[in-house]
Image (cartoon, grey):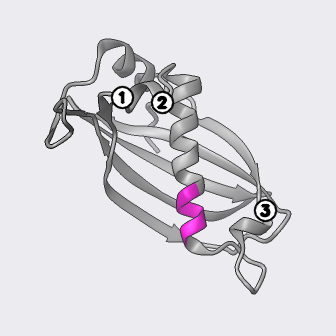
Amino acid sequence: MGAEFIKIEKVRFQHTDAAGIVFYPRFLEMLNGLVEDWFEEALHLPFKALHQTAGVPTVDLQVQFKKAARLGDLLTKKLWVITIGNSSVVYGFCFMNTNEICIQGQATLVFVKYTEDKSAIFSQHWTAELKSGMELYLINK
């Protein structure tokens, strides 16, 4: 069984709305940050290097908002792999505040390559290194 990729993030003023709770699109920005950190820290491919010739756009996203998070809260953000395809990966995620889930869901990324002028994109197979790195986070929940 694989491991979860885990990061802690403090809810900042920039994340909240007038009611002092996290504005829902900010959760998705935090999720994108978690994915970027996973690629850089766990898969050893920083987005800066990846996005020079390729990318990993999100093609499907399912989110359930369970509980509000507030300014100053410390969120434990978790990511794990559900399935790995030839050029896609489905990952699960949850953000927790203490022992309560604030958001949870899953998303699908596709590994794409750009033409030199970036006028077209097409899917490509994961490299052996990326695929084996992802397998370390494969969990059946």
User: Tag 2, which secondary structure?
Assistant: helix
User: Tag 3, which secondary structure?
Assistant: loop
Q: Residue at x 59, y 63 (%)?
A: 27
How many other residues sit within 10 Å of disc 1, few (<14), some (14-19) or many (≥20)?
Answer: few
Q: Nearer the viewer, residue 135 or 56?
A: 56
On screen, 59 above or below 89? Answer: below
Q: Are marks 3 and 2 in contact (CB under 8 Å)?
A: no
On screen, 28 above or below 115? Answer: below
Q: Amino acid at mark 1?
A: Gln
Q: Number of labelled discs?
A: 3
Q: In the orientation shown, which residue stands out farthest toward the bottom?
A: 19
Q: Nearer the viewer, residue 54 or 39?
A: 54
**Magenta part, dominant SS:** helix
Q: Earlier in the sequence, mark 3 or mark 2?
A: 3
Q: Residue at x 44, y 24 (%)?
A: 49
Residue 131 pos. (x, y %): 34, 21
Residue 90 pos. (x, y %): 35, 43
Q: Amino acid at mark 3?
A: Arg
Q: Amino acid at mark 2?
A: Lys
Residue 14 pos. (x, y %): 73, 66
> Image quarter for residue 12?
bottom right
- In the shown orientation, is residue 68 left or right of residue 58? right
The magenta stretch spans which residues? Answer: 25-29
Q: Are marks 1 and 2 in contact (CB under 8 Å)?
A: yes
Which residue in the protein does label 3 denote? 12
Q: Residue at x 21, y 39 (%)?
A: 118
User: Tag 1, which secondary structure?
Assistant: loop
Which residue in the protein does label 2 denote? 48
On screen, 80 above or below 63? Answer: above
Q: Residue at x 52, y 38 (%)?
A: 36
Regarding residue 29, the answer to whether it shows in the image is yes
